[in-house]
Amino acid sequence: MQLNSLYLRIAHEQYHLLKFILEGYDGLCLLSTVPGRKGCVCLRYPDNYRITLFELLAAISGKIAVKN
C-alpha cells in the first residue's frame, strides 16, 4: 500500500493531543516528528482516507495551530 505524506507545523506542546486524537481513528494515518524541526510533523496516510483526515485536521486546527 502506498502512503501519501503531509507535512504540518503545529504548536510543539500540542503534539501529544494530535497523537491522541489520531489514534482514535484506527488506520487513518501514521504520525511522526521531523528530526531537527521543532513543531514539524509528518502524517502518512492512504489515499482513501484523504477526505476524512483533512476534515478532521480542519476541525481541530484551532487547537493545534502555532500561535504567533
Image: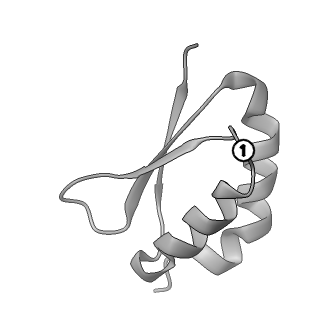
Q: Which amino acid does label 1 sit on?
A: Asp
Seen as rendered, the residue at the extreme bottom is 68
> Observer-nearest residue: 20 or 60?
20
Q: Is residue 4 left or right of residue 56?
A: left
Horizontal side, residue 21 vs residue 4: left or right: right
Q: How many marks?
A: 1
Residue at (46% x, 76% y) in the render: 11
Residue 28: quadrant of the picture:
top right
What is the x, y in percent for residue 45?
Answer: 60, 33
Furthest residue to the top?
Answer: 1
* 55 sits to left or right of 53: right
Which residue lies at the image location 80% right of the left edge and 65% below the top edge? 59
Residue projecting furthest to the left = 36
- Examine the rendering and report whether any part of residue 57 can be seen: yes
- Would residue 65 be seen by someone viewing this image from the given angle? no
For mark 1, what is the residue?
A: 26
Residue at disc 1, secondary structure: loop
Asked where in the image residue 33 lies, by quadrant, the reply is: bottom left
Indicate the position of residue 29 as horizontal and vertical percent values.
61, 41
Q: Where is residue 2 in the image (x, y as percent from the top left)?
A: 55, 15
Residue at x 56% of width, y 63% of height: 19
Q: Quadrant of the N terminus?
A: top right
Q: How many neighbours does mark 1 have within 10 angstroms: few (below 14), some (14-19), or many (20 or more)?
A: few
